[in-house]
Image (cartoon, coloured by chain):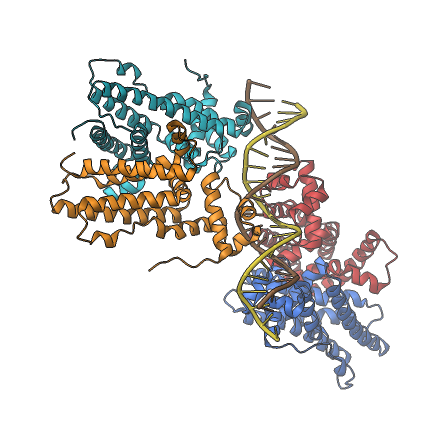
Chain colours: A cyan, B orange, C blue, D red, E brown, F yellow
Amino acid sequence: MSVNKDYNEKQGQILTTAESLFSEKGFDGTSVRDIAEKAGVNVAMISYYFGSKEKLMETIFERRTEHIRLRVESLMKDDSIDYIGKVHLIIDEHIEKAFSKFQFYKLMVCEQVINKNPVILDIIKEVKKRNMQVITELIRKGQEAGVFRSDVDVILLFSTMYGTVSHMIIGSDLYREISGLTHLSEEEYYQHLKQLLSKHLKQIFKAILTHEA
Amino acid sequence: MSVNKDYNEKQGQILTTAESLFSEKGFDGTSVRDIAEKAGVNVAMISYYFGSKEKLMETIFERRTEHIRLRVESLMKDDSIDYIGKVHLIIDEHIEKAFSKFQFYKLMVCEQVINKNPVILDIIKEVKKRNMQVITELIRKGQEAGVFRSDVDVILLFSTMYGTVSHMIIGSDLYREISGLTHLSEEEYYQHLKQLLSKHLKQIFKAILTHEA
Amino acid sequence: MSVNKDYNEKQGQILTTAESLFSEKGFDGTSVRDIAEKAGVNVAMISYYFGSKEKLMETIFERRTEHIRLRVESLMKDDSIDYIGKVHLIIDEHIEKAFSKFQFYKLMVCEQVINKNPVILDIIKEVKKRNMQVITELIRKGQEAGVFRSDVDVILLFSTMYGTVSHMIIGSDLYREISGLTHLSEEEYYQHLKQLLSKHLKQIFKAILTHEA
Amino acid sequence: MSVNKDYNEKQGQILTTAESLFSEKGFDGTSVRDIAEKAGVNVAMISYYFGSKEKLMETIFERRTEHIRLRVESLMKDDSIDYIGKVHLIIDEHIEKAFSKFQFYKLMVCEQVINKNPVILDIIKEVKKRNMQVITELIRKGQEAGVFRSDVDVILLFSTMYGTVSHMIIGSDLYREISGLTHLSEEEYYQHLKQLLSKHLKQIFKAILTHEA
DNA sequence: CATGAATGAGCGTTCATTCAT
DNA sequence: TATGAATGAACGCTCATTCAT
């Protein structure tokens, strides 16, 4: 099922380093020398292993595709969880994934904006479609069960979930400053954010999906 | 009141072209020769007018600062509009601004991610703080009037507004495809999106701000 | 007799500023913008007044030609001064001229090395030949009078005079440091140097020109 | 003992070519493309090997430092050579070194004038101090032995040696023309000059250092 | 299998100069 | 007469990539 190849230690090192640097300085703002140096490998090794800088970027996305994909499918079928509970699962999984690989999520946002590389764009589109299908299906069932309202725009709901989380991650520095939480470590502040976001999004989803407030 | 200088025709041409290219290909992915060629000016003219590529970018942001800033302040004082009405004004103004300068909004998202240039980051932070203050003030008054709930997190609300709109603009291609609206022109699709977003965000704000659904 | 044109105030300002900058940073290391800015004139004015940066340099040399030229000719004919006295006059005049326009002398040294501009080289050659003729003539007369030795190489003598003085001017910083005279102002140190050089060169000339020590 | 690194063939080729071009056209008057073309290497190779144009210049000076340094130290201790003989050794060694690397000596003169690069200036100062110490020590011993006069200014003597030789090298074209020796090759003329300079400087040193003429 | 050496292409910038006014 | 605006050319340098070993 997985398209992920196995990467040896050096390849993994390069991928992780590149992901980090691309996310911090952008694709064009990062040189292969930067990556090679920080990853402790030879410059030529990047072309050698991945073919080119572009292919390296694509490999980063391929490697993380698995991660972006919502994994709640099996739980969806679990009848012991109600529809709102399943929505909560989705929200929490998304938040968890986004914050655990926040550098990659930043990178993904930029790549969508710049959309220079069609391969990457396809990967992003594919996984987004996939995730939307999961949600669409859940909402459809909820609607059939009479739990969810019939006039729900999944795209908008999806955008709010992705958009709000992305925006918080991207602007976390500013919001930490405004919140006066500069005394927290990044890790602590992220834990705090995750809780806030979870509650916030659940409130929004409930309001939009259900008949009552 | 405005800090904007006046730009002559060529300067304006360069600024608009650069904004467009930076937004499409990123700052580092755009060369000054790209800009010069597309703007129909000499390469040297960019340094001549703006000092450097970086300064050009900063000038783009300075020029648009005015635009990003919410201008509803005066309407806020208009007693003939109720609190929810004022919230709607804010939402619609933000959507209108974002879509009318969508390239700049994309650029702004990427610059926040990459955050290489502190001058630009400061501009973004400043205007975001400013806009949040407007909203905070309105909500505070609404709370005093007993119209709005007391447990409102403005940052989260703000992030949802900005994040949802940004996300729709960034992913508009994908969502147009999924919606099956590829027959619409970009302009027509954007009009459609704006309406959807307006309704969507108003629903969310109402749910979060007010006591009833 | 003089080929010097009259320069208006701005032209003089440009010439003096350029002479100083060329001497400090070299011809190619100085931009016309540097000169214009420091001289407080428009950039275009340099081309306007002097035709080009090269012509400006040539004009600097033309203006100073008069200054480099030894002016002892009339004194040479004064029978009340003996031959050694006349040699002393030459030495002191050269030292005085070199130190009073030390920036130009530095510039002259560099231009001889770089010898890119034939016009300037010609100017230098002409005035050097002229000055050597004065000395040659004096020495010839001194030889005829039996005061000076017959085996004198004027070129070598000339080189020692010019070379020693140039070298002291060029390396004055180092020599001031070595001499432990850093407490003196440049002006004071130059006065000191001039006296030392005068005595030193007179000693050398006497040794080489005359029969006794 | 030597701080000189070993330079491979291409590095040596670049260094020699650059030294020649810098000496002929000045540092700022020489482009890295000039050097690369004349040295038969790629432009990028200069940055690749030396880091920058400036560093290349510094490397040229580092490479020649060894050469400038007077190497008579061992001979100084040879008791079979008298003090005047040792002075002659110094003079001849200096002349030999200067003429064998005359391009570098020209370069050194210009760099002292322009003194833009402190690294290079330090190298020059260091080696000059070093060489002056050698001479100072010799003269001191000669004075103790009663051979040399007590009132000797080493700086002036040093300046005369360096200055005269430099001046002859810089103005060799003019002096060859005046001497009517244009039929000689540069090599032949230099041999001739070296002999003249040797005799001339020895005569000067003798006059200044010793009690008799 | 891995890499140091090397390179053509392109980068952002500065240059001396021109020209319309 | 004097100058702000503008420019083609060249600058030093970095880039991703190739290739012999």
* Residue A195 in picture, x, y percent from top left: 22, 30
Q: Quadrant of residue D59?
A: top right
* Residue B138 in picture, x, y percent from top left: 20, 48
State whether residue C98 is above or below residue D65.
below
Does residue D78 show up?
no
Describe residue B108's horizontal placement relative to residue B145 as left or right. right
State whether residue B19 is above or below residue C125.
above
**Which image quadrant: the C terminus of chain A?**
top left
Q: Quadrant of residue D129?
A: bottom right
Give the camera-side residue of A153 and C165: A153
User: Quick one: which residue is furthest to the right in this view?
Assistant: D183
Describe residue D193's horizontal placement relative to residue B49 as left or right. right
* Residue C58 in picture, x, y percent from top left: 70, 67
State whether residue C105 is above or below residue D73.
below
Does residue D51 show up?
yes
Give the camera-side residue of B67 and C64: B67
Q: Residue at x 29, y 14 (%)?
A: A74
**Which image quadrant: the N terminus of chain A?**
top left
User: Quick one: which residue is furthest to the front in this view?
Assistant: B183
Describe residue D179's horizontal placement relative to residue C24 as left or right. right
Q: Residue at x 64, y 57 (%)?
A: C28
Describe residue B194's horizontal placement relative to residue D57 as left or right. left
* Residue D109 in picture, x, y percent from top left: 66, 57
